[in-house]
Amino acid sequence: MIYDVQKANVLKRASGFLLDIILIAVLAVGFMALLSLICDYDGHYNSYKNEIESAQNTVIEKYKNERGINLGITKEEYEQLGEEEKTAFDECAKLANEDMKKILLASDTYKKESSLVLSLSLMMTSVGIFLAMLVLEFIIPVCFKNGQTIGKKVFGIAVMHTNGVRVRPLSMFVRSILGMYVFEIMVPVLIGLMMFFGTLSVLIGSIVLVAICVLQLAVFISTRNTTRSFLHDLMARTVTVDLASQMIFDSEEELLEFKKEEQNALAERSNYKEKGGFDFYNSSLNYRKGKKIVDENGKNIENEEQNAPESTSQTASENETVSKTVVLRTDEQISSESATNGDENIKK
């Protein structure tokens, strides 16, 4: 196979995912705190809480005055009661719960504040997580250009398309926002909030959460021999790879050109095996930066071009040395002739 996907190690993926989840949680809490200040969430929650406490106190006083039973005792005080007292207490507690519901439903303030608290809780949670995911799972990977979050960057893994091409911003948006945020995060979070506020049955919510986990596990197991994908990878046609050993191409044209070169190299090697020889001059190995390395006689073209200026400079330096030697010899001859003529004049 000419090109292969170098799947990332499961331990690296798990470590990077854990780091990303921690960062997303911290950033999401920060955004939610900012939103709570803007929406005055604490004021609405305190008003909601005060209505519940007021209804509880009213019911406790009622049963204390009518039946002489104090429903506001602690758990330790309840354990110290006798069997008959516990039976009477439990009966009054059931009746008190019904009375409390009637009081709260008759209160317009409770209806308004409970609705606001639930709506604001859902809004702050969804918007806070969305902004955190947008920053850490979309903007940062697009800036890194290899689909890398901070966790993936730390552990040397990246995200690309399944065909080996660099992931595009649109695919990254589908993977991070539509896949991870909407389906894998917000659906479980909203189910948890609905179970917490009592608007969804705990049994139904638990079944849905388990079904999502089973679906994710089934997708991963079914792709363990190919891409080891989760639902968000299937939606965006992406795969998590080991960046150190994976070739990632900027475009499909670059990928096709690479495969074409590899096929040519394979063809040349097969010709060498079949013919028992290898035509290096006409092969792709005889090219460097668009120029041939050796000529038809097997001489290195680059060395000849480099040696040509060197030989020229060497010849020039030799000529200069010869000229200097001739000049020196001429000066010596003139001085010797002058000395000879002087001696002859002295003798005369």
Image (cartoon, rainbow, N blue to C red):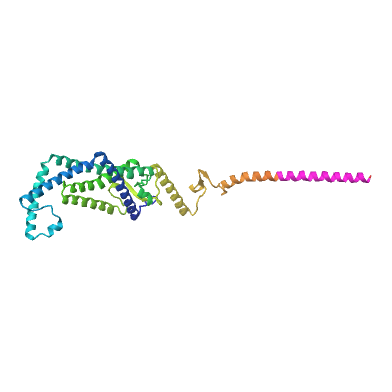
Q: Which quadrant would residue 320 be assigned to in this image?
A: top right
Q: Position of residue 265 (x, y in %)?
A: 45, 49
Residue found 7% across the figure and 57% down from its top: 87
* Numbered disc total: 0
Residues 124 and 131: in front is 124
Left or right of residue 16, residue 86 in this image: left
Residue found 61% across the figure and 46% down from its top: 307
What's drawn in magenta, residue-wise? Answer: 320-347
The reply to whether residue 227 is in sight is no
Q: Position of residue 119 (x, y in %)?
A: 20, 41
Residue found 92% across the figure and 45% down from its top: 346
Q: Position of residue 19 (x, y in %)?
A: 33, 51
Left or right of residue 343, residue 197 in this image: left
Quadrant where the C terminus sits is top right
The residue lying furthest to the right in this view is 348
- Main SS class of the magenta portion in the image: helix
Any magenta on residue 317? Answer: no
Residues 51 and 303: in front is 51
Q: Position of residue 310 (x, y in %)?
A: 63, 45
Any magenta on residue 342? Answer: yes
Left or right of residue 99, residue 294 in this image: right
Residue found 75% across the figure and 46% down from its top: 325
The reply to whether residue 14 is in sight is yes
Residues 105 and 54: in front is 54
